[in-house]
Image (tube, rainbow, N blue to C red):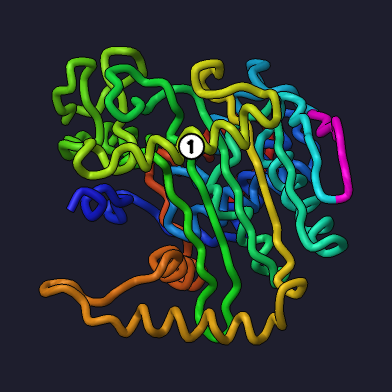
Amino acid sequence: MALEYLKLDESNSIRISAEDLHKQVSAILQGVGTPQDHAEITAKILVSASLRGVDTHGVGNAVRYSVSIEDGTYTIPQTVEVISETETTALLSCGNGLGFVAAHQGMEMSIAKAREFGLGMATIRDGHHIGMVGYYPMMATQNDMIGMAMTNANQAVRPALGARPRVGTNPIAFGAPSGDERDFILDMATSTVASGKIGLARRLGVEIPEGWAVTGEGEPVTDPPADRGDHWSQNPLGGSREQGSHKGYGLGVMVDILCGVLSGGGVGTQLAGGENMSWTMAIDIARFRDVDDFKSMMDDMIRELHETPPLPGEKAVLVAGDPEADFEDDRSANGVPVENGQYDEMRLRAADLGVEVFI
């Protein structure tokens, strides 16, 4: 129910083509000094999130990133530095710039290493937000590979049994290619809900369900807070001890290890708001078995899952990536809905920067 009502309000939105949105985002970023190739990568990832219905991580963030560049929070132009590298691994520094750029390079390197050696991975420090984490495994599936990506963040989620936030929402994404069926794309926070959903609820002026967050005394939070602090925290995936909160908590710490400890960039308790360390991996399926046979078995599995009888009152059984793919089909054909406020904000920002207004 909660996820159902926390959707972009199409009655308060305007549909814009993905192409024009890409041009606008890129122009805004270039207007504050971002090199064209870096602006194009960032625009591509933000538009992909909007196309797939992940609006909290989409084009509406372009203005915020441009302000972070202008006020010096981000170092632009940035230099993505390879600190150490082997045949199958790499440690990168994002250079305190746009996280999208370094994460994209990290996955490109992971794919290239997997193509040559069967497996490739990169961990990235000195970074910021990388957007929709599911984008990066999709880069791997497009190359007939299995892909994974993770990113950590500053403390927002309490440990299981804990009363104060210590771990980030720390999302995990995994992708595997299929044949005739849609690729399997899992993109999930290790908290009960992504923090962007709480921000969206506040913007829409609606309460959040019990179970998403608690006070320091363990009481449910239903009025979405405006800021973070020790007075409240999000719940780990599972929510309560009885419902398996130790699992979400453990996964969140795993993300901190691969992204923050392995890179040396820091874990949730050590990161400032807006700092994010990341990790990517690609696996070459062909090193294990014939790719077409792999995809055929993926198709069989996905069809069997779809054919599962649904519970009473439910329409059908879904597989990870189905809702996002449905959004992408619609929005590619009919345009991406952008909230009126964000639409006006982007146009005003473009005009203020003296760049072309495309939307």
Looking at numbered disc 1 in the image, what kind of residue is underneath it? Asn
Res 141 quadrant in image: bottom right
* Residue 6: percent from left, percent from top: 26, 47
* Residue 330: percent from left, percent from top: 43, 71
Residue pictured at 83% horizontal, 58% vertical: 112
Kindly tell me whether residue 281 is visible in this rendering: yes
* Residue 295: percent from left, percent from top: 60, 81
Q: Residue furthest top?
A: 230
Q: Nearer the viewer, residue 344 or 49?
A: 49
Q: Which of 194 and 253 is in front in this view?
A: 253
Q: Residue furthest left?
A: 312
Kindly tell me whether residue 350 is visible in this rendering: no
Q: Which of 170 and 228 is in front in this view?
A: 170
Q: Is residue 234 left or right of residue 153?
A: left
Mark 1 surroundings: few (<14), some (14-19) or many (≥20) residues within 10 A: many
Q: In this view, does 206 lie to the left or right of 326?
A: left
The magenta-colored residue range is 78-87
Residue pictured at 53% horizontal, 62% vertical: 17
Q: Is mark 1 on a helix, strand or loop?
A: loop
Residue pictured at 86% horizontal, 34% vertical: 84
Q: Does the magenta stretch include residue 7?
A: no
**Quick check: 86 above or below 202?**
below
Q: In this view, does 214 lie to the left or right of 280?
A: left
**Quick check: 195 above or below 328?**
above
**Quick check: 290 above or below 10?**
below
Number of marks: 1
Residue pictured at 16% horizontal, 73% vertical: 311
Q: Does the magenta stretch include residue 79?
A: yes
Q: Is residue 23 left or right of residue 175?
A: right
Q: Name the residue under label 1.
A: 170
**Quick check: 334 above or below 302?**
above
